[in-house]
Amino acid sequence: MGMTIAEKILAAKGGRKTVVPGDVVTVHLDTIILFDNNFMPSNWRDIQRVCDPERIVVVFDHRVPAPNQLAAGGHHTGREFVKRFGITRFHDVGREQGISHQLVADYGYAVPGSTLVCSDSHTCSGGVFNCLARGVGGPDIIYAAVKGETWFRCGETTRYELEGTLSKAVTAKDAFLQIAGVHGDHATQNVEYGGSGVAGLSINARKTITTMSAELSAEFATFECDDTLVQWVQARTQRPFTAVQPDADAKYKAVRTVNLSELTPLVALPDSVVNNSQPVGALKGTRIDQAYIGSCANGTQDDLELAAAVLRGRRVAAGVRLIVVPASQTVYRDALKSGAIATLVEAGATIAPPTCGACGGGHMGVLAAEETCITSSTRNFKGRMGEPSSRVFMASPATVAASAIVGTISDPREFLN
């Protein structure tokens, strides 16, 4: 019987010839990422040894620079951990700062056929690189750092065939909102993306889809490998790798087609991502207090350039706060060089340092009671970005930028003709 991408990597890393849904597999881990939340006093357990310092990455991203004493203490613990074990892949506040999942893309920490874990729920982001990447619990990441392995139960796989080409002002975020809105959650399942339409999607666009797949409750989200992906990885790392493609007779729970050419801008209503999307026109006129562009899903160079294109020569509406958060210092520097940052600032945006920030309600844009935000970040759950009575709508960076101009939820196609 043929295997899917996830099944083939589980088999290879678990020392098996085959893996089928329902199997529990102990796998070798190539990359183990610890981030600042892991080092908080309530989470941290003093580690006496690590499996291999070369397989560990430490990132400060959720609360950077430290907004309070608790975060500062966690950062101190993390820095001492890095010194103790000689960990070289360390992303402190400064030049190499960024959200962990963006750093995976920037520095080639995930390569085809590899395995990667982190205790952040959006770790499936790394599956864009034709690998297995998954978020695990806090105790599990400590175990992984010590032992260099973990276990997974293999679920069934649902495959999405992406066809066609996205039209102007329609993005990979809209493609995801279409999948989530129509097909709902994929709990206990793997999600595999392929099809002729993938060639027209940048790595950043594909990464938006794998990152957001956490909101489907997917176990793993993987893309097929192509030349675009190979070139991206080889430009950032010398690690050897072997691309993994699904077998022709792989067995899927379902195979579904998404025609990118037919998509329009979508918005997820507050409090849920799945089964909760509407065309932007249905929300047109909804007043907003804040517009937020950033996160591991939509803080890339592509996203900032798109927002700048919408905002060029225009101004953010009075009474609206537009907060833009590059996902890494690399993205920030590139957007500075291209002029995108200048355009955003001239329009009235505030540029925050690379951080998870308000996406998780930590800082840099937390909402007050009864406020309304439209965001391109990862999650819109009640209380996610601040006070529980606030409302969070989710959309693409283009839709967020257009809404910031008007002061109400607006269609980006009106600004990108």
Image (cartoon, grey):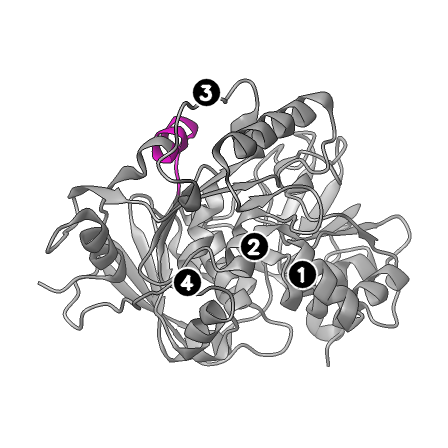
Label 3 Cα crowd, 10 Å radius (few <14 / some 14-19 / many 20+): few
Q: Which residue is drawn at 53% across and 45% down?
A: 88
In the picture, the quarter occupied by the C terminus is bottom right
| Residue picked out by circle 1 | 331
Mark 4 or 3, closer to the camera:
3
| Residue picked out by circle 3 | 45
Helix, strand or loop for disc 4: helix
- Which amino acid lies under the numbered mark 4 shown in the image of this protein? Phe
- Which amino acid lies under the numbered mark 2 shown in the image of this protein? Gln
- Which amino acid lies under the numbered mark 1 shown in the image of this protein? Val
Helix, strand or loop for disc 3: loop
| Residue picked out by circle 4 | 129
Helix, strand or loop for disc 2: helix
Residue 163 coordinates in the image, percent (x, y): 40, 78
Report whether residue 410 is seen.
no
Q: In this view, does 42 lie above or below 144?
A: above
Report whether residue 364 is seen.
yes
Q: How far apart are marks 3 and 1 (CA)?
A: 33 Å
* Contact between labelled residues 4 and 2, with CB atoms less than 8 Å apart: no
Q: How far apart are marks 4 and 1 (CA)?
A: 18 Å
Question: Magenta residues?
Answer: 135-145
Characterize the magenta stretch by its predominant secondary structure.
helix
| In the image, residue 416 lies in the stretch drawn in magenta | no
Mark 4 or 1 closer to N-term?
Answer: 4
| Residue picked out by circle 2 | 102
Mark 3 or 1 closer to N-term?
Answer: 3
